[in-house]
Amino acid sequence: MTLSSPAVRAVLLGNAALIVTVLCWGSMPPLMHELLKRYEAVEIAVLRYTVAAPMLIAILVSPIGGRPPASGTIAGALPRLVGLGGLGVVAFASAYTFGIYYAGPVQASIVSSAAPVIAVAIGWLVHRDVPDRTLLLGIAVAAPGAAVALGAGNAGATAAASPWTLALGVALVLLANVSWTMYSALARRWLPGWPPVALTAATIASGGILFTVAYLIAGFAGLVRFPPPAPTALDAGLFTAVAMFGICLGVVCWNFGVGRLGLSLAALYLNLLPVVAIGLSAMLGAAVTAQHLLGAGLVILGLGGAQLKRLYDARAADGRRQAAAER
């Protein structure tokens, strides 16, 4: 099979798209940490989706997004879109941004890599899905790694460094992962038949608009600082980057990669997010210690190795079924 064959091109493009996703999503914690030096956490949580909403609407109406089914028009699906947007944007963005504020970008990125564990826990609670032994073994390796990394403290956080602020930041990042996992699980159930990119663009844009309206109401009521500080050229560039790359390009490339390679293989790439976050944080001046690196390495080894083993087992089982069917 040559490099010019359609199958090989699809695999290469899928891997390239997922590499872009890792770069986009992994850079978010350190870039948001830079914004936290001048903006309050709630302002960053809102403004990045306010900037992204028009871009997502453009994706939704373009050929990239695909069209929703005729029976599920935007107007008819509006209550579900708003509900999913509230879960996947308002709850997720608020918890995640405050988590970075309290825990710091390095610790937040390491905790975020626990998303597969949260998905398993929610699957057990909601569907009574029993986790397989491979993933449990991976968790057994990753959990001490997370403990090692968190033991380094949160000296790089915007908030005052202490065990209490670190614990609060970790709890908020975990809550953000729970919100995103629940959003992902409910999106397919509430909007069946929607193309993946269209579904994501519509729900996240709805959440961004909802978040903006809620922020304006809170601002006029005096509950939060309003208006936010006028952005400098650097601020505008950072907000555009986290909106365009972290929310829009990252989502489109993620869905493209999943479509070409499947969810199991695509999920392996997410284990590399701490590598990008730690590297960029170090470039921006954050203190990265050997303890951070050792802990992150154990998390990646445990969860990444478990997912790779599960992927191998699934493909081997498919091969056996195909061989049995051909007899």
Image (tube, rainbow, N blue to C red):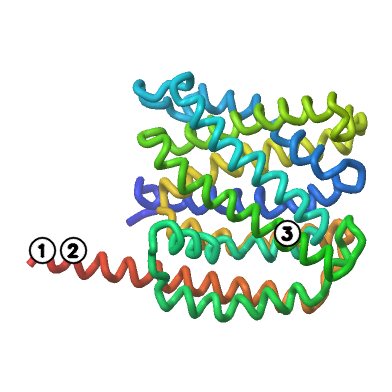
Instruction: Check the image and report above or below for 317 versus 52.
Output: below
Instruction: Check the image and report above or below for 13 versus 236.
Output: below
Q: Is residue 204 left or right of residue 78?
A: right
Q: Is residue 213 left or right of residue 69?
A: right
Percent position (x, y) of residue 30?
A: 79, 54
Query: Is tag 1's residue or tag 3's residue first in the polypeptide sequence?
Result: 3
Could you tell me the amino acid type at mark 1? Glu
Q: Which residue is mark 1?
A: 326
Crowding around mark 1 (Cα neighbors within 10 Å: few <14, some 14 to 19, many 20+) is few
- Residue furthest top as drawn: 75
Total marks placed: 3
Q: Which residue is mark 2?
A: 322
Q: Which residue is mark 3?
A: 277
Q: Nearer the viewer, residue 165 or 256?
A: 165
Quadrant of the frame with the C terminus: bottom left
Q: Secondary structure at mark 3?
A: helix
